[in-house]
Amino acid sequence: MPETYLSDRDLAARWGVHHLTPRRWQRTDPTFPRSIKLTPGCCRWRLSEIEAWETAKAQTAA
């Protein structure tokens, strides 16, 4: 199955935050998944890594 990639705007819509927030989290939270540069000027996050990060965050919050 092909990998699914999300933009910063996709992540912002997913969590209800500003579109620059995922980039800030990437700089400040060492557990936040790193984006991947697909082409010049095009960075995306792997959906599988985002889902794993969300799961880990939910487990530590419980």
Image (tube, rainbow, N blue to C red):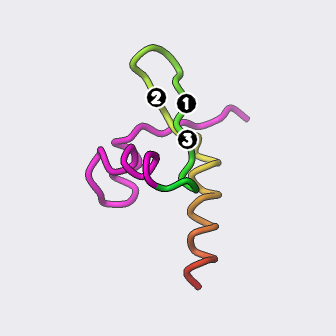
Residue farthest left in this picture = 18
Q: Quadrant of the C terminus?
A: bottom right
Mark 2 vs mark 1: which is more N-terminal?
1
Work out how far the residue at label 2 is from the one at label 1, CA to CA, in angstroms: 5 Å
Q: Amino acid at mark 1?
A: Ile
Does the magenta portion include 22? yes
Q: Are marks 1 and 3 in contact (CB under 8 Å)?
A: yes
- Location of mark 3 (residue): 34
Observer-nearest of 60 and 14: 60
Q: Is residue 48 above or below residue 60?
A: above
Q: Pinpoint residue 51: horizontal percent, then vertical percent.
A: 60, 56
Residue beneath the point at 54% across and 53% down = 32
Task: Identify the amino acid type marked 3.
Answer: Arg
On whether residue 5 falls in the magenta region, the answer is yes
What stretch of residues is rendered in magenta? 1-28
Percent position (x, y) of residue 34?
Answer: 55, 41
Is the Cβ of the residue at disc 2 closer than 8 Å to that at disc 1? yes
The residue carrying mark 1 is: 36
The answer for how far apart the CA atoms under marks 2 and 3 are is: 10 Å
- Which of these two is toward me, 59 or 48? 59
